[in-house]
């Protein structure tokens, strides 16, 4: 089903993969003017059935990006020498805008790559952006609608090469200078990025100055250069400062004409391996080993693994790799898919005690044109692909004992975009939606003079299937399942009721396992139901009211006459029936409000128990500890049915003896009582909001709010006197909706 709204792009699309979807539900569209970012927000405060999209953009830099390959005088002499060369291939190489920006650099985005979730300071995704003038930068969105450049990796790598004298991995200085054409070409190609790919998050043990080991998380960014080199950059998480990025390793793949790149990561029990899949314009595909030093449990491939060795001059593009479970062998395997002209290449990798098993083949696309874009679903490994003048096709894998068979079918085509030309597709993180960027085809047999580019959203799952996946979610986090949640929200707003089977199953699971995730899911359903029962606004809130003005008496009389006429017309329809319906809606809304209040209170009380448990485990309680321990115990002590809570409070009171560190107002130094989990008011009437993570009073001018604006939290940079365990509490997501605090 097609979903609204349709997003119009301000510039034509550019790059090989125009659409890329992130794990935190942000869709990046590459255009010639900027990088358009659309964030899918599952807004429970909106009673409209349309998608809620927050739009931002990253502008293409206006200043020219120049490669530094040596001394300026030597490079100028080389340009003069080779510009008059008899060989046209050499003269054509000097006409490359990357070498000579004065010829006019192309403007636009070449490629983007989203990092895994939890890499930036807010717990969200980093964005690596490569422009058409070969500038590679990493961006972060610390605020809601603001993007910042953290590091320019092209500039950083150029400085590294300059310090090393443009030597290769063997550190041997080059024997020739820039007047040698091969050396000039090598220096340009060794720093021209083609594609990039992020790894998953790794944990590395580091030795502290006090001889203790600390687990530090990191993520690697692999950059494929034009000469086939793989440059790996290390980002220590959470990454917020561009100076902290480190050069990790350089892998020489030996591929002379590389085209695409993807990470291969295999994990099955104790077997953990990783590598980089490199495709070439000539056709071969191989996995290059990557050495992960200090990463627990990961082993390295001894030799490159050849996935396809035929040099048939069919370029490899749209490389994708997902982990799937073999239903017959009950083992984890890797499914690799790529586009090769009019064919879809697939490869199944399985690691067993007998060794590494590689099965590969091709699926012929039903179009005569090459495959323009390809996407793979994380759940089940379904492959979606399309061509420029064709529609989206789906390949569903069917596993057998020794092989893999794909069932090919066509995705249902809405009439409104049936005749449009498709440039790229991308699936959401959990496979709920597929996004398409398209433009007009032939209009009345002619190509239009001016084309408009649009992004459309189609559903891939039914709300019933989304509900089943949410109940069986392995992540146990509502924010990570936001695309599936939006389908359930759409169903409730459309039907104005929660499906009875879903609510019964949810209540049964809550009774069996008192999980915070299930309580948050229930709160989400009831809040959406409450929004569906509310009548839409018929007048604008910003317009002034004229009820008290005598000048508009005639207008009011007319309005009253209109209302009287409307009431008179309703009398014939039956006012008693209308009144009964209104009373039923008011009763349902009152029930929904009661359930919302009780569920929020339950979640907050469970979080208070968690905070008290952390307080009990940390023996050092000083006056600088800002957790309102006494207030939390007094607030929770009324529950006589929870025996574990009584024991915990008793232990904490024995531990604190007679010490009571009350919170005080920063304006008048009066005691702040703990009577409500949302806010606190001192005796002089100063009102402070409470942090939903640590339940401290937020007495600063700035604080954080979750993505759905449910709760507030203190800034992630706490006071210097606070210990590490309080800092860890402040890094958690929202208590009510699992959204990150921004």
Image (cartoon, rainbow, N blue to C red):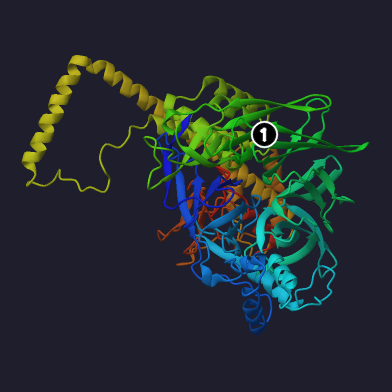
Residue 350 x/y as whole percent: 83, 36
Q: Mark 1 sits on what residue?
A: 379
285 lies left or right of 194: right
Q: Position of residue 496 (x, y in %)?
A: 42, 26
Where, by quadrant of the figure, is residue 430 drawn? top right
Residue at 18% in and 15% down: 572
The percent position of residue 311, horizontal first and vertical second, equals 77, 46
Which residue is rendered at x = 74% and y = 72% of the image?
Answer: 183
Q: Residue at x 56, y 20 (%)?
A: 501
Residue 228's place in the image compared with 409, above or below, is: below
Farthest residue in the bottom direction? 73
| Residue at the spot 93% in from the left edge and 36% down from the top edge | 354
| Residue 145 in view, yes or no | no
Q: Nearer the viewer, residue 679 or 663?
A: 679
User: Which one is in front, 726 or 412?
Assistant: 412
Q: Is residue 40 left or right of residue 84?
A: left
Determine whether 231 is above or below 448 in the image: below
Look at the picture and state if 68 lies above or below 654.
below
Q: Position of residue 260 (x, y in %)?
A: 69, 50
In the picture shown, does residue 549 fall above or below 187? above
Question: Badge 1 local density, few (<14 within 10 Å), some, or many (20+)?
Answer: few
Observer-nearest of 292 and 426? 426
Label 1: which secondary element:
loop
């Amino acid at each position: 089903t097609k979903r609204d709204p349709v997003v119009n792009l301000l510039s034509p699309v550019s790059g090989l993969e125009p659409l890329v979807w992130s794990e935190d539900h942000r869709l990046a569209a590459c255009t010639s003017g900027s990088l358009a970012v659309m964030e899918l927000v599952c807004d429970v405060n909106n009673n409209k059935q349309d998608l809620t999209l927050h739009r931002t953009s990253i502008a293409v830099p206006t200043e020219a990006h120049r490669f530094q390959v040596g001394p300026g005088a030597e490079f100028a002499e080389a340009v003069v020498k080779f510009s008059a060369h008899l060989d046209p291939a050499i003269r054509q190489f000097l006409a490359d805008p990357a070498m000579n920006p004065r010829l006019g650099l192309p403007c636009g985005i070449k490629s983007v790559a989203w990092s895994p979730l939890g890499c930036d300071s807010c717990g969200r995704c980093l964005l690596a952006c490569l422009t058409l003038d070969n500038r590679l930068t990493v961006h972060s969105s610390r605020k809601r609608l603001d993007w910042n450049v953290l590091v320019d990796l092209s500039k950083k790598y150029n400085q590294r090469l300059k310090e090393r004298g443009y030597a290769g991995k063997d550190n041997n200085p080059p024997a020739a200078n820039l007047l040698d054409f091969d050396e000039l070409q090598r220096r340009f190609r060794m720093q021209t990025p083609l594609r990039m790919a992020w790894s998953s998050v790794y944990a590395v043990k580091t030795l502290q100055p006090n001889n203790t080991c600390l687990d530090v998380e990191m993520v690697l960014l692999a950059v494929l250069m034009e000469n086939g080199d793989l440059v790996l950059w290390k980002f220590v998480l959470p990454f917020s400062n561009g100076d902290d990025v480190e050069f990790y390793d350089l892998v020489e793949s030996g591929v002379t004409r590389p085209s695409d790149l993807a990470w291969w990561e295999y994990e099955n029990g104790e077997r953990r391996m990783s590598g980089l899949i490199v495709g070439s314009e000539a056709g071969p595909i191989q996995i290059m080993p990557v050495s992960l030093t200090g990463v627990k449990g990961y082993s390295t491939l001894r030799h490159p693994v050849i996935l396809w060795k035929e040099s048939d001059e069919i370029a490899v593009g749209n490389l994708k790799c997902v982990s799937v479970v073999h239903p017959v062998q009950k083992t984890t395997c890797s499914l690799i898919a790529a586009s090769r002209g009019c064919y879809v290449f697939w490869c199944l990798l399985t690691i067993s005690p007998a060794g590494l098993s590689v099965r590969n083949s091709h699926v012929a696309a039903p179009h005569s044109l090459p495959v323009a874009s390809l996407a793979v679903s994380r759940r089940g490994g379904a492959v979606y692909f399309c061509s420029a003048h064709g529609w989206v096709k789906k390949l569903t894998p069917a596993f057998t004992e020794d092989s893999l068979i794909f069932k090919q079918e066509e995705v249902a085509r809405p009439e409104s975009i049936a005749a449009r030309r498709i440039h790229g597709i991308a699936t959401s993180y959990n496979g709920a939606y597929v996004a398409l960027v398209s433009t007009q085809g032939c209009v009345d047999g002619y190509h239009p003079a001016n084309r408009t580019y649009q992004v459309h959203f189609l559903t891939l799952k039914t709300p019933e299937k989304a509900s089943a996946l949410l109940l069986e979610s392995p992540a146990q986090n509502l924010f990570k399942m936001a695309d599936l949640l939006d389908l359930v929200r759409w169903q409730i707003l459309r039907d104005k009721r929660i499906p009875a089977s879903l609510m019964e199953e949810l209540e049964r699971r809550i009774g069996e396992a008192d999980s915070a995730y299930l309580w948050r899911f229930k709160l989400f359903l009831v809040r959406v139901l409450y929004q569906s029962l509310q009548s839409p606004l018929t007048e604008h809130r910003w317009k002034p009211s004229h009820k008290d003005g005598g000048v508009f008496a005639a207008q009011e009389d007319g309005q009253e006459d209109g209302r009287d006429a409307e009431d008179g017309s309703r009398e014939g329809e039956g006012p008693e029936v209308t009144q009964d319906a209104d009373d039923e809606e008011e009763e349902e809304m009152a029930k929904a409000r009661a359930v919302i209040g009780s569920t929020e209170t339950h979640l907050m009380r469970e979080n208070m128990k968690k905070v008290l448990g952390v307080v009990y485990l940390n023996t050092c309680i000083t006056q600088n500890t800002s957790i309102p321990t006494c207030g939390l115990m007094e607030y929770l002590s009324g529950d006589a049915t929870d025996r574990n809570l009584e024991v915990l409070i008793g232990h904490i009171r024995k531990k604190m003896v007679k010490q009571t560190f009350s919170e005080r107002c920063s304006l008048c130094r009066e005691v702040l009582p703990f009577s409500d989990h949302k806010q606190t008011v001192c005796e002089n009437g100063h009102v402070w909001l409470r942090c939903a993570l640590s339940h401290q009073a937020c007495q600063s001018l700035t604080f954080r709010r979750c993505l759905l604006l449910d709760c507030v939290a203190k800034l992630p940079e706490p006071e210097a006197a606070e210990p590490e365990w309080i800092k860890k509490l402040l890094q958690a997501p929202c208590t009510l909706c699992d959204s990150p605090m921004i």
